[in-house]
Each structure stands twice: as structure tokens, then as C-alpha cells.
Image (spheres, helix red, strand yellow):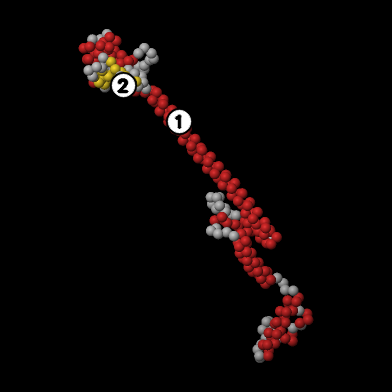
Amino acid sequence: MSVGYIKLHRSLLEWQYWDDHNTTRLLIYFLVSVNYEPKKWMGIQINAGSFVTSYDRISQATKMTQSQIRRSMKILISENQISQKTTNKFQLVSLIKWDELQLGENKTTNKQQSNNNQTTIKQQQLKNTKNNKKERITNQLSLISVRKNEFKESLRPFLSKYGSELLNDFFGYWTEPNHSNTKMKFELQKTWSIERRLNTWVKNDKNYNSQKTTFQNANRKPTIEEAQQQQLDRILKNAGQLFNGQEPTDDNERFEDVDFQNC
């Protein structure tokens, strides 16, 4: 194989067999001879970092004797540098640390790139999640605004019957949103009939107005007619008490002391 190149790590200088020139030579020969990618040979899968050879071919390439080759291969096997599979036709030599020696930096770079890509993907997913949530909230507010307007329009046919003041109160009460701003109060009811709800609202409103009117009447100054009627009632009450032999009440006024005309 005369094309391409290999990586030769500086740690090789610190290897205990560096000064053993035959063993070092043989290791370097294996490094430049093994497959750099998986290949098929005679129907057999030969992985990257392995190659098929023989003692004769190794001897021709390295100028080492077979005895020297066998000795150095034993050292490489004991150092866990290579593995050897021998048949009656060929030898399969594999560099155990091929990935570490030739792909280590690429693995680190690829792992870093993979981590960076995963981080970028997670950040993008998080950003998309936030954007989707914001968009969902915006859509919810937009939808609730549309439904609120539709509810308002549904009240218009009753404007002439109930007036704007009552309908505004009714509209404000029933369009109050829930905590998540997804539904309004009238949408949370099990059943809903706007006409029936308005009838109930008017009844409650009339009761309130009736109580309010009674309170106001109790505290306002009576008219002349009402004062005369009240005075007449007191006179009749006192007359009845005199007839029964009782002292008249109501500030001890007597029938003959009341000037009816001037009340």
C-alpha cells in the first residue's frame, strides 16, 4: 500500500521496545500495511486495522528473517499491540490499538462536534418550546378576544329590551376569564341559555332595585300629601286611645291640639 499516510504518536518514543529496532520496524510496517477501511478478501471480511499476510511477505518487506519476525511478533502480542490468527494458507494480523492510534483525535473531534450538535439541538428545542408556548398563549388570548366579541354581539338583540347599562353589567360578569386565560365564566357553565340567564339577571336586578327604592323612600323627606296622611293616622290612633280611656302617645299630642290644615 503506497497511497496515503498514517499517524505516528510521539508516545512511541517512550515505548520500552523502542530500542528494539526489529520490533519497532515490524510495528511500523504493520501500521502502514493494515486496511484503513473494511475490505473483503476471498469472501472474508477484513476489518480496518487488519490485513492478510504471511511470513514470506513480511520478510521480503522488512528484510527480517522469519526467526526475527516470530520473536518480534511474540513481543507485540505480549504488549497487546497486535493479535494474530494463523491458518494453513495465511495469517490475519490485527492492530489492537488501531482506533486509538489512528482515529483517536478524530473520535474526540467527532464526539465534541456531536456534543455541540446535541447542545445546539437542545437549545433550539428549548427555544422552539418557549416560542410555541408564547405563540400558544398569544393564540389563546386572540381566540378568547374573538369569542368575547362574539358574546357581545349575541347581546345586541336584547339592547332595546334591557338597555345598555344592564347588558354592560351582564357582559362584564360573564366574560371574566379563568386563571389560565383560556375560558370565560360563561364558557365554564354546564348549560348556557343567554335568554334564560338574562331573565334571571333581570329578576335579581329588580329585587335589588326594589330594596334600593325602599331604602331611599325611608330616608327621603315626605311630600305634603304624605305628611298629611301620616298626621291623620296619628290623630286617628290617638282618638282610639282616648276612646278606650288611654293616654295618647306620639309625643303626648291630643286630637284637639293638632292643626290638620297646617300640617
Disc 1 to disc 2: CB gap under 8 Å: no
| Residue drawn at x 33%, y 15% as measured from the top left | 32
Local secondary structure at mark 2 = loop
In this view, 236 is above or below 148: below
Picture disc at residue 95: none
Q: Position of residue 142 (x, y in %)?
A: 59, 46
Q: Position of residue 175 (x, y in %)?
A: 60, 54
In this view, 247 is above or below 71: below
Which residue is most to the front?
Answer: 43
Q: Position of residue 224 (x, y in %)?
A: 76, 75
| Residue drawn at x 57%, y 54% as measured from the top left | 184
Label 1 to label 2, Cα distance in Å? 39 Å
| Residue drawn at x 65%, y 89% as measured from the top left | 246
Q: Earlier in the sequence, mark 1 or mark 2?
A: 2
Q: Residues within 10 Å of mark 2 (few under 14, many from 20)?
A: few
Please state which of residues 220 and 144 is positioned toward the viewer in this rendering: 144
Left-right relation of 113 to 227? left
Q: Quadrant of residue 41?
A: top left
Q: Which amino acid type is marked by label 2?
A: Gly
Residue at the disc numbered 2: 43
Q: Which amino acid type is marked by label 1?
A: Asn
Please state which of residues 26 and 18 is positioned toward the viewer in this rendering: 26
- Using the rendered image of the protein, determine whether residue 237 is visible from the camera's viewpoint: yes
Q: How many marks overall?
A: 2
**Disc 1 vs disc 2: which is toward the camera?**
2
In this view, 168 is above or below 98: below
Query: Which quarter of the rendering shows the C terminus?
Result: bottom right
Query: Which quarter of the rendering shows the N terminus?
Result: top left
| Residue drawn at x 70%, y 82% as measured from the top left | 233
Left-right relation of 2 to 214? left
Residue at the disc numbered 1: 117
Q: Quadrant of residue 243?
A: bottom right
